[in-house]
Amino acid sequence: MKFAICNETFGDRSFADTFSTIAKLGYTGVEIAPFTFAPHDEPFDLRKVPTERFVEVRAMAADAGLEIIGLHWLLAKTEGNYLTNPDPTVRRRTADYLKLLAEACADLGGNIMVLGSPKQRNLLPGVSHEDAESYAVEVLHGAIGACKQYGVTIAVEPLGPAEGDFMLTAESGIRLCKLVNSPHCKLHLDVKAMSSEAKPIPDIIRDSREWMVHFHANDPNLLGPGMGDVDFKPIFAALKETNYNGWVSVEVFKYEPSPDDIARQSIEYMRKIEAAVAHEPLD
């Protein structure tokens, strides 16, 4: 398996420091939250970041021996962007912003953009789920051309009810992908989010095998894999069974005891589980 971690885990630490730290711990990939290019600016605007900065950060990662997977938290901390807004002007603006993100992702050397950002997609007053879904499809259609141009795939991310009320299951994520109907729109799965579904996580993985392009490892307690109650052995077994060859990227939402400890414990646990699964035959 290929293990990565999200850079915002390390707060305001520099890209160079973050990359060096996670590479020493044994990760080979890093996932970037766009707002970390200007962590103290809110709202964040990607347009203020020069292309040269993306190229510079890409070189930093390469120097550390890391691959930049791509981006996540795509719309977080931005202003005026919304995936399911009934206003066509907002939808066009959001599609245009996703185009800019696709270009930035390619400049960084990445090819995956995880579309979570629940605060920019939850149902607005008077908007039905059906309408919200059609608005989301329109926005994604507007961005897909740029994704194709830059070799980037948008990975839509189902999230649990603790985060919001739109696209709460893997099945709803797949339905959105089918409506977009592009090889540049696929599915991202997250352990914390899947823990809120009635279906067991290994079954979700198996049922999503034709759509999944990216995977987040974490726990409902907001910490890393192995730091809570979720047993990753059947999860990794399902990833093996479905021949998943993408990244397993650690994303946490609590940073105690420290980012370094979380990163270390997470990869040590995942390596242990990977080794255990490797020595067991598939059913």
Image (spheres, grey):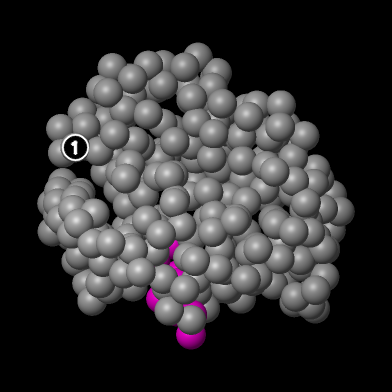
Mark 1 falls on what kind of element? loop
Where residue 37 appears, x then y in whole percent?
Answer: 44, 33
Foreground of the two, 66 or 10: 66
Which residue carries the number 1 mark? 26
From this viewpoint, is residue 8 visible?
Answer: no
From this viewpoint, is residue 260 visible?
Answer: yes
Where residue 63 appears, x then y in whole percent?
Answer: 28, 17
Horizontal side, residue 237 vs residue 107: left or right: left
Above or below 194: residue 178: above
On-image quarter of the C terminus: bottom left
Extreme residue toward the right, this view: 88
Residue 45 figure quarter = top right
Residue 223 figure quarter = bottom left
Above or below 6: residue 278: below
The three-letter amino acid code for the residue at tag 1 is Gly
Foreground of the two, 63 or 174: 174
Region rendered in magenta: 190-198
Q: Sort mark 1 into few (<14), some (14-19) or many (20+) by Cα contacts within 10 Å.
A: some
Horizontal side, residue 239 vs residue 172: left or right: left
